[in-house]
Amino acid sequence: MIKLIKVKNYNEVSKKAFEIMKEVLDKKTVTLGLATGSSPIGLYERMVDSYNKNEISFKDVTTFNLDEYIGLDVNHPESYSSFMNRNLFSKVDINKNNINLPKNGSDSKLSEEYEDLLSNHQIDLQLLGIGSNGHIGFNEPGTSFDSLTHIVDLNESTIQDNARFFDNDISKVPTQARSMGLATIMKSKKILLIATSENKAQAIYDMIHGEVTIDCPASILQNHPDVTVIVDEDAAKLI
Ligand code: GLP
């Protein structure tokens, strides 16, 4: 079931998302599924602020990130590993051994290893953004609903959307990524999806009101028992 929360702007989305995140973090020993992109940055800032005020701790938190580019050095500033260190991990008391991200190598065994690791945990809260084409993680339209962690060829539209992180030069954007699959994401106890801006409006409409179809990967969330979607006015334009 999808619970929809509409708020005014990015700042309000981050604020509301933090309230939900905090309820989970208050349980202390938790496993979080984390996302990258512009959408979660405001939420991560609030998590860091709250940690600095001694309200929350990450000592007993384990994290699994959704995805990582293939072939991009982990130390590249736009690798998702660097993104997470910059925006969250380096700023809080998380134990480095409890941080998990998909590996950037092209061997398919690395996907199985990540899935094995995940199968020993249940994600208490999976944070998601959404691509303008309805992707979650890097599960592009057409991805099987049964998919586990796998290597993905990125769509032209995703490469274009992400070029802004690579000097607006599409030739610098990696063409493949490793992503948790849709079935992996669906195993999470609770899912929180956040989206802002008008270019997400169609994907948000299709996810909530459209047919459950692999053409809109996020529509699979209609089949999950506990999903909260927080959107700003622009992303909610069509609903
Ligand atoms: C990328 C990520 C997704 C993310 C999406 C939206 O493609 N792999 O996990 O949700 O972009 O990003 P943004 O929040 O920057 O719009």
Image: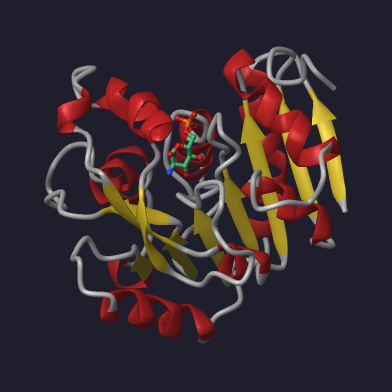
In the displayed structure, 10 sits above or below 28; it is above
Q: Nearer the viewer, residue 16 or 67?
A: 67
- Residue 194 in the figure: left or right of residue 169: right
Viewer-closest of 47 and 82:
82
136 sits to left or right of 151: right
Q: Quadrant of residue 202?
A: top right
Please identify the quadrant where the C terminus is shown. Answer: top right
Residue 133 in percent (x, y) is at 56, 34
Looking at the image, residue 71 sits to the left or right of residue 19; the answer is left
Q: Is residue 180 above or below residue 78?
A: below
Residue at 35% in and 38% down: 87
Q: How is the image coloured?
A: secondary structure
Residue under the image location 55 percent in, 43 percent down: 135
Picture layout, residue 31 above or below residue 85: below
Q: How many marks?
A: 0
Name the one closer to the observer, 138 or 59: 138
**Residue 193 in which image quadrant:** top right
Q: Residue at x 84, y 62 (%)?
A: 225
Residue 62, given in percent of the width and then of the height, sits at: 46, 69
Q: Nearer the viewer, residue 168 or 194?
A: 168
Q: Is residue 155 above or below residue 99?
A: above
Question: x, y percentage for residue 76?
Answer: 13, 42
> Which quadrant of the figure contains the N terminus?
bottom right
